[in-house]
């Protein structure tokens, strides 16, 4: 399976998952931290099972190196970046935002900032290529989210035309 198809699948899963989460949070019977805890407790056994299969090359899945082969610098990057920053802090902020706002506003903001930061840090920290096409794409993504989530001129034009009728 290629990277683009996996990314589309992830986006579909996140989109469906966050609509369910927002619905549950706005029902007022669960809070954001409870929702994150449930998400994590459900995800962990599935992730452990897939990890077990991938480290053994089962069912033709790509073989993944065992964690026993991981050095301390890699552990640090994964624990800090993926575990603490993306796994804990981002989820607390995102689920708290979902509990306060609409998924149609919260999700585009969060999920447009992420690729913009990824492109910029990929260029600045990892030495990935930055070109005009990427800069324009990031600008268009961020501009699209601004149009979607704020009282932009496009929204004001629609409101003005409705008021005139």
Image (tube, rainbow, N blue to C red):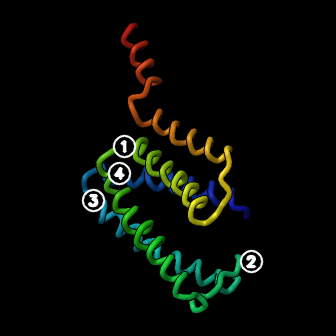
Q: Which mark is residue 102?
A: 1
Residue lying furthest bottom? 68
Which residue is found at the position 39% from the left and 62% from the top?
A: 91
* Spatial CA span between label 1 and label 3: 16 Å
Q: Residues within 10 Å of mark 1 (few under 14, many from 20)?
A: some
**Is mark 1 in CB contact (under 8 Å) with mark 4?**
no
Instruction: Give the structural element (helix, strand or loop) at label 2.
Output: helix
Mark 4 is surrounded, within 10 Å at the Cα level, by few (under 14), some (14 to 19) or many (20 or more) other residues, namely: many
Specify which label sits upstream in the sequence, 4 or 2. 2
**105 in relation to 154, above or below:** below
Are the two marked residues, 3 and 2, in contact with CB atoms closer than 8 angstroms? no
Q: Upstream in the sequence, badge 3 or badge 4? A: 3
Q: Please state the horizontal and vertical placement of residue 5, each as a whole percent of the image.
A: 68, 57
Dividing the picture into quadrants, the one containing residue 95 is: bottom left
Please name the residue that numbered disc 4 is placed on.
98
Query: Residue 130: where, in percent of width, then height?
Result: 65, 53
Comparing 3 with 12, the one in front is 3
Q: Position of residue 2 (x, y in %)?
A: 73, 62
Per the model, the C-alpha gap separating discs 1 and 2 is 40 Å
Q: Secondary structure at mark 3?
A: loop
- Give the Cα separation between the discs numbered 3 and 2: 40 Å
**Which label was assigned to residue 60?**
2
Nearer the N terminus, badge 1 or badge 2? 2
- The residues bearing labels 1 and 4 have C-alpha atoms spaced at a distance of 6 Å
Determine crowd level at label 2: few under 14, some 14-19, many 20+ residues with C-alpha closer than 10 A.
few
Check disc 3 and report the residue beneath it: 30
Measure the alpha-carbon separation of dots 4 and 2.
Answer: 38 Å
Number of the front mark, 1 or 3:
1
Question: Residue 150 sits in which quadrant?
Answer: top left
């Amino acid at each position: 399976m290629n990277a683009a198809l996996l990314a589309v699948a992830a986006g579909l899963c996140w989109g469906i998952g966050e609509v369910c989460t927002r619905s549950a949070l706005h029902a007022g019977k669960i809070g954001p931290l409870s929702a994150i805890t449930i998400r994590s407790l459900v995800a962990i056994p599935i992730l452990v099972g897939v990890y077990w299969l991938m480290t053994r090359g089962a069912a033709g899945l790509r073989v993944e190196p065992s964690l026993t082969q991981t050095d301390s610098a890699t552990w640090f990057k994964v624990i800090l970046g993926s575990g603490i920053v993306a796994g804990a802090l981002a989820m607390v902020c995102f689920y708290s935002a979902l509990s306060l706002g609409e998924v149609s506003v919260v999700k585009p903001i969060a999920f447009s900032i992420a690729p913009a930061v990824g492109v910029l840090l990929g260029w600045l920290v990892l030495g990935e290529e930055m070109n005009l096409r990427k800069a324009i794409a990031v600008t268009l993504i961020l501009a699209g989210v601004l149009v979607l989530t704020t009282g932009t001129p496009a929204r004001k034009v629609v409101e003005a035309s409705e008021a005139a009728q």
